[in-house]
């Protein structure tokens, strides 16, 4: 495990703890999903929940850097919204995994987007190693550089990384919305796709206003 993975693991453990508390009599209702015919470990539903949780947690990690490094009210509000929304969504996805009786992580990264279920979709390499980087995620070096910035320099780099991060998760969200077995998973994935597309447009405007240019799309 790299140093950059430790905050993600700590956040994930916290989310899992909350999800486990939900596993009482009303857990299925609270999480918007049923217990019958739970998706299997190699399903789109499980793969989406695992990979999108990890993808989201990096966005939360970056957003949590903002309060100490930015004084820009617009950036601070954006970061708060991203952190709150995506942490909540991770809680729902980890709750589903607990209800389905599968591990919160595992499997080849994005392998659930390949094979017959893809319906002609290009998919991703099913041989990818477990834990391999997903599109749009920042590297250890990029995160370290971001932590060393403040003020407008931080704001610009934060927007650049978050725009690319949202763009990278769009394909997963769209695929989950189209191919997941559970309606609750499809609905959440569709909501993610729409919300993050709108946020990307807003962040691109904000970046331009601050004199920055986007990173190449993932």
Image (spheres, rainbow, N blue to C red):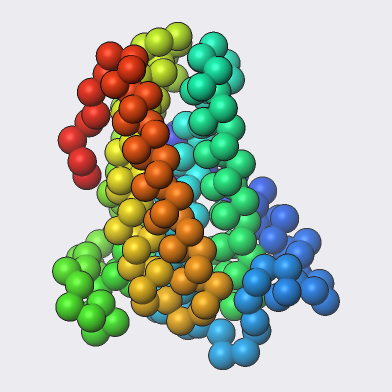
- For the C terminus, give its image quadrant: top left
Q: Residue at x 45, y 10 (%)?
A: 150
Q: Is residue 10 above or below residue 107?
A: above
Q: Residue at x 58, y 32 (%)?
A: 80
Q: Is residue 99 above or below residue 70?
A: below
Residue 39 position in % (x across, y down)? 50, 82
- For the N terminus, give its image quadrant: top left
Residue 146 position in % (x across, y down)? 39, 21
The answer to which image quadrant residue 155 occupies is top left
Viewer can see residue 140: no
The answer to which image quadrant residue 130 occupies is bottom left
Q: 27 left or right of 122?
A: right
Viewer can see residue 165: yes
The answer to which image quadrant residue 112 occupies is bottom left
Q: Residue at x 50, y 45 (%)?
A: 57
**Residue that extends furthest to the bottom in the rendered view of this protein:** 37
Count how many numbered circles sit on residues in the image. Answer: 0
**Residue that extends furthest to the top in the rendered view of this protein:** 151
Residue 166 position in % (x across, y down)? 36, 44
Q: Residue at x 36, y 12 (%)?
A: 153
Residue 171 position in % (x across, y down)? 30, 58
Q: 96 left or right of 161?
A: right
């Amino acid at each position: 495990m790299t140093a950059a993975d430790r905050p993600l693991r700590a956040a994930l453990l916290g989310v899992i703890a909350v999800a486990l508390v939900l596993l009482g009599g009303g857990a299925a209702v609270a999480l918007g999903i049923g217990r019958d015919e739970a998706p299997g470990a190699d399903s789109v539903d499980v793969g989406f929940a695992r990979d999108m949780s990890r993808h989201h947690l990096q966005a939360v990690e970056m957003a949590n850097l903002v309060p100490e490094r930015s004084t820009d009210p617009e950036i601070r509000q954006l970061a708060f919204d991203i952190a709150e929304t995506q942490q909540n969504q991770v809680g729902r996805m980890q709750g589903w995994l607990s209800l389905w009786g599968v591990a919160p992580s595992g499997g080849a990264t994005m392998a659930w987007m390949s094979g017959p279920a893809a319906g002609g979709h290009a998919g991703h390499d099913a041989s990818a190693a477990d834990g391999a980087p997903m599109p749009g995620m920042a590297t250890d070096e990029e995160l370290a550089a971001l932590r060393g910035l403040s003020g407008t320099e931080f704001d610009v780099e934060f927007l650049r990384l978050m725009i690319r991060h949202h763009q990278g998760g769009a394909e997963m969200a769209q695929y989950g919305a189209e191919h997941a077995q559970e309606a609750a998973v499809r609905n959440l994935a569709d909501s993610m796709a729409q919300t993050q597309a709108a946020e990307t447009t807003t962040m691109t405007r904000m970046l331009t206003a601050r004199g920055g240019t986007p990173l190449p799309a993932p």
